[in-house]
């Protein structure tokens, strides 16, 4: 057996096995990442479509370490395997060991003893017996009927989100759940138009989830001067406060927000960038405060790299910033131009500006000339 390391961290184990007298080499990732998986039918994009308005409820039960069973009576084993791994990647955003510890992509009744003692497991199965055994799961994702079924014990989670329950199935498009799913699907459709690959689209969903987790956890501790009314209205709600309280006992929640932050990163950076992405919901003074806050943050190439990590190409790169060059307020346009010029001072920033779409590149060049 050999071990391979990446950046000082043990990343893979390579071993040889002889199950039937013939040697087979296995290369097993210890910290599987989103890009290690190639999904053919049930990536995160398809799971959003399957769960619909209940997708955010599924995300929450994963965060709260509830038991999830993915069931298909008519599909293939590969379908439930992919669906279980896709949901496992959500947990990986908060714990890099989540998939390896808690996800069992395919199982039968005989395998129950292998995972029944694991808190917050996610399993895939083709056996309809699981549907009848309500004590084996808290949430059932039904791939065939494209619905999510909650156990009675999990109704409180759904009530936090305001989703109605009819016959145990989540129904109705509650405002928060519906908007979250719609935001993701809207971005997916944009990327499809741009002919982005399925893997890139799944990566985009992971990034959106990561940002949403960060906002849910950090907004309550953020200084008032960088919190727009939109952020306060959407992330300082009683329902999210209750979810945060429920999540305090979850192992995934321990160590937050440190697990979501990069070395040397200020939590306010995530909030400022997320606000900039939602600039259409902000007034003039809120945008100016955010842009000035980001300008004061960028003092070296290190801070620019941190900014670009929070503004990846999958989420539009610097386009949300460049779009403020078209704002109706001259003060907002000036603040945006100063920030982009600061970004351009450093090589990573110049590369990011060059990677913007051609329209915003033209807008920035024009604004720079006019200034």
Image: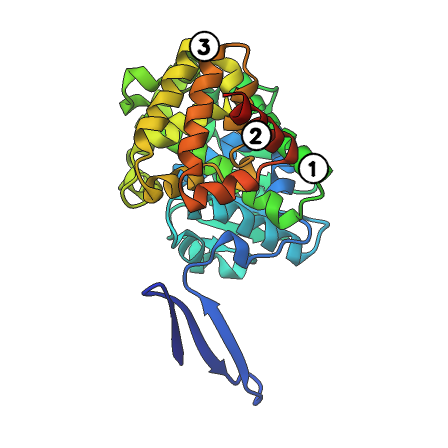
Mark 3 vs 1, N-terminal side:
1
Name the image colouring.
rainbow
If the image is split into quadrants, where does the N terminus sit?
A: bottom left
Q: Residue at x 50, y 10 (%)?
A: 329
Q: Could you say which quadrant of the image residue 191 lies in?
A: top right
Residue pictured at 59% horizontal, 34% vertical: 148
Instruction: Judge whether 2 appears above or below 174 on screen.
Output: below
Residue 340, by quadrant, is: top left
Going 49% across and 72% down the picture, which residue do you hit?
A: 27
Q: Judge from the rendering whether residue 76 lies leftward or rightward of residue 36; answer left or right.
A: right
Q: Nearer the viewer, residue 157 or 357?
A: 357
Q: Residues within 10 Å of mark 1 (few under 14, many from 20)?
A: few
Question: In 3D space, how far apart are the residues under numbered discs 3 and 1 (Cα atoms)?
Answer: 46 Å
Q: CA distance from mark 3 to mark 2?
A: 23 Å
| Residue at image coords 55%, 31% | 319
Residue 156 visible to an observer of this rendering: no
Q: Which mark is residue 145?
A: 1
Disc 3 or 2, which lies upstream in sequence? Answer: 3
Front position in the image: 142 or 209: 209
Residue 84 x, y percent position in the rendering: 55, 50
Q: Quadrant of residue 51?
A: top right
**Mark 2, residues whose alpha carbon is within 10 Å: few (<14), some, or many (≥20)?**
few
> How packed is label 3: few (under 14 Cα within 10 Å), some, or many (20 or more)?
some
What mark, if any, has residue 365 been given in the picture?
2
Q: Is residue 39 visible?
A: yes
Residue under label 3: 284
For the residues bearing labels 1 and 2, Cβ distance under 8 angstroms: no
Where residue 2 sits in the image (x, y, percent)?
A: 39, 79
């Amino acid at each position: 057996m050999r071990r391979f390391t990446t950046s000082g961290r043990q990343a893979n184990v390579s071993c040889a096995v002889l199950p039937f007298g013939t040697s087979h080499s296995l290369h097993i990732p210890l910290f599987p990442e989103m890009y290690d998986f190639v999904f053919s039918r049930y990536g995160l994009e398809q799971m959003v479509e399957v769960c619909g308005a209940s997708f955010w409820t599924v995300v929450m039960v994963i965060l709260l370490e509830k038991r999830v069973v993915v069931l298909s009576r008519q599909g293939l084993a590969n379908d439930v395997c992919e669906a279980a791994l896709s949901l496992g990647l959500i947990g990986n955003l908060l714990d890099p060991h989540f998939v390896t510890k808690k996800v069992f992509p395919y199982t039968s009744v005989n395998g129950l003893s292998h995972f029944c003692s694991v808190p917050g497991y996610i399993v895939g199965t083709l056996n309809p017996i699981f549907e009848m055994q309500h004590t084996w799961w808290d949430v059932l994702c039904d791939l065939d009927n494209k619905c999510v079924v909650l156990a009675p014990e999990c109704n409180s989670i759904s009530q936090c989100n305001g989703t109605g329950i009819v016959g145990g199935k989540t129904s109705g498009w509650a405002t928060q759940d519906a908007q979250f799913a719609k935001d993701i699907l809207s971005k997916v459709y944009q990327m499809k138009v741009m002919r982005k690959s399925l893997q890139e689209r799944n990566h985009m969903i992971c990034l959106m989830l990561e940002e949403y987790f960060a906002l849910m956890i950090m907004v309550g501790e953020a200084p008032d001067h960088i919190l727009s009314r939109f952020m306060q209205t959407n992330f300082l709600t009683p329902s999210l406060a209750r979810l945060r309280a429920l999540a305090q006992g979850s192992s995934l929640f321990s160590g937050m927000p440190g697990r979501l932050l990069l070395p040397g990163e200020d939590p306010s950076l995530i909030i400022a960038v997320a606000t900039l992405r939602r600039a259409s919901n902000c007034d003039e003074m809120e945008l100016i405060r955010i842009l000035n806050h980001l300008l004061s943050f960028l003092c070296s190439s290190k801070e620019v790299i941190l900014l670009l990590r929070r503004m990846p190409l999958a989420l539009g790169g610097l386009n949300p910033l460049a779009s403020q060059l078209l704002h109706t307020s001259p003060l907002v346009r000036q603040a945006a131009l100063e920030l982009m010029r600061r970004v351009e001072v450093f090589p990573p920033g110049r590369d990011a500006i060059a990677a913007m779409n051609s329209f915003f590149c033209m807008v920035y060049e024009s604004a720079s000339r006019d200034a």
